Image (spheres, rainbow, N blue to C red):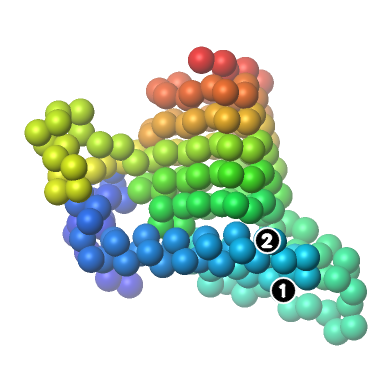
């Protein structure tokens, strides 16, 4: 699949322009997928399988789900999908296609992910409500920043396995949160790389 040089710069964390037709279209696609996912979450009849399918639409995951066994109940089918991440609505992302979730990840409601660069969340990690992961950033020089006409950039965010992120936490670009860590509610994680069992409250 061809990737434009502008998009390649974004993925590498270099300065790029966000308001090109290509990237605007990608964000609109993700926005529509998020709206569909969030509205479906209000439907009492939505199955776990449908929830997972709609999530895969957001992140652009085309791998097929295991087929439902003939004659299985909803509970039995849900058990078949037990390793799939669980994301509560409402959820919002910028592109969606730069989000990677491991097995058994749980994301509570009102999560926002700005996935300019790769945002990776390891298996069995738990995110409380109102967590924001911002991999995108802007130049500090206002002349270079220049509103929608100026460039942007980003850095990847990595949250490793078995992490618990408390409510209302903000994670900034370039942060790695180490395996087994606990991030206290209300924290702003900036340039810190956490290791196992650290509690951060900034």
Mark nearer the viewer, 2 or 1:
2
Farthest residue in the bottom direction?
A: 70
Under tag 1, what secondary structure?
loop
For image coordinates 58% across by 37% down, the residue present is: 130
Residue at the left extreme, as displayed: 143
Rendering quarter of residue 199:
top right
**Is 3 on the left or on the right of 111, as rendered?**
left
Nearest to the observer: residue 165 or residue 61: 165
Q: Residue shown at 47%/66% (left/top)?
A: 32
Residue 80 visible within the image? no
Q: CA distance from mark 2 to mark 1?
A: 22 Å
Measured from the top left, where is residue 105 in percent x and y?
67, 47
Q: Is 152 on the left-hand or right-hand side of 51?
A: left
Whole-percent x, y for residue 124 in the image: 69, 43
Q: Position of residue 144 (x, y in %)?
A: 11, 36
Q: Earlier in the sequence, mark 2 or mark 1?
A: 2
Q: Residues within 10 Å of mark 2 (few under 14, many from 20)?
A: some
Residue that appears at 72% across and 73% down: 66
Query: Does residue 56 sit above or below 196 in this rendering?
Result: below
Q: Is residue 169 above or below residue 11?
A: above
Q: Is residue 40 visible?
A: yes
Q: Which residue is mark 1?
A: 66
* Residue 181, quarter of the rendered image: top right
The one nearer the camera, 41 or 2, is 41
Mark 1 surroundings within 10 Å by alpha-carbon count, few (fewer than 14), some (14 through 19), many (20 or more): few
Q: Quadrant of the N terminus?
A: bottom left
In the picture shown, does residue 167 fall above or below 17? Answer: above
Residue nearest the viewer, comparing 62 with 142: 142
Mark 2: secondary structure: loop
Marking on residue 41: 2
Q: Residue at x 38, y 64 (%)?
A: 28
């Amino acid at each position: 699949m061809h990737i434009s040089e502008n998009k390649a710069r974004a993925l590498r964390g270099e300065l790029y322009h966000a308001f090109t037709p290509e990237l605007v279209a990608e964000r609109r696609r993700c926005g529509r997928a998020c709206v569909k996912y969030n509205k479906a979450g209000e439907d009492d009849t939505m199955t776990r399988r449908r929830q997972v399918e709609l999530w895969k639409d957001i992140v652009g995951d085309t791998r097929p789900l295991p087929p439902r066994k003939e004659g299985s109940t909803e509970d039995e089918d849900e058990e078949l999908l037990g390793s799939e991440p669980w994301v509560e609505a409402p959820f919002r992302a910028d592109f969606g296609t730069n989000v990677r979730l491991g097995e058994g990840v749980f994301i509570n409601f009102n999560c926002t992910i700005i996935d300019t660069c790769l945002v990776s969340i390891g298996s069995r990690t738990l995110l409380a409500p109102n967590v924001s992961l911002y991999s995108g950033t802007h130049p500090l020089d206002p002349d270079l920043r220049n509103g929608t006409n100026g460039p942007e950039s980003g850095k990847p965010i990595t949250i490793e396995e078995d992490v618990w992120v408390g409510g209302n936490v903000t994670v900034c670009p370039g942060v790695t949160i180490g395996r087994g860590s606990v991030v206290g509610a209300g924290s702003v994680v900036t340039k810190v790389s956490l290791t196992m069992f650290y509690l951060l409250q900034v």
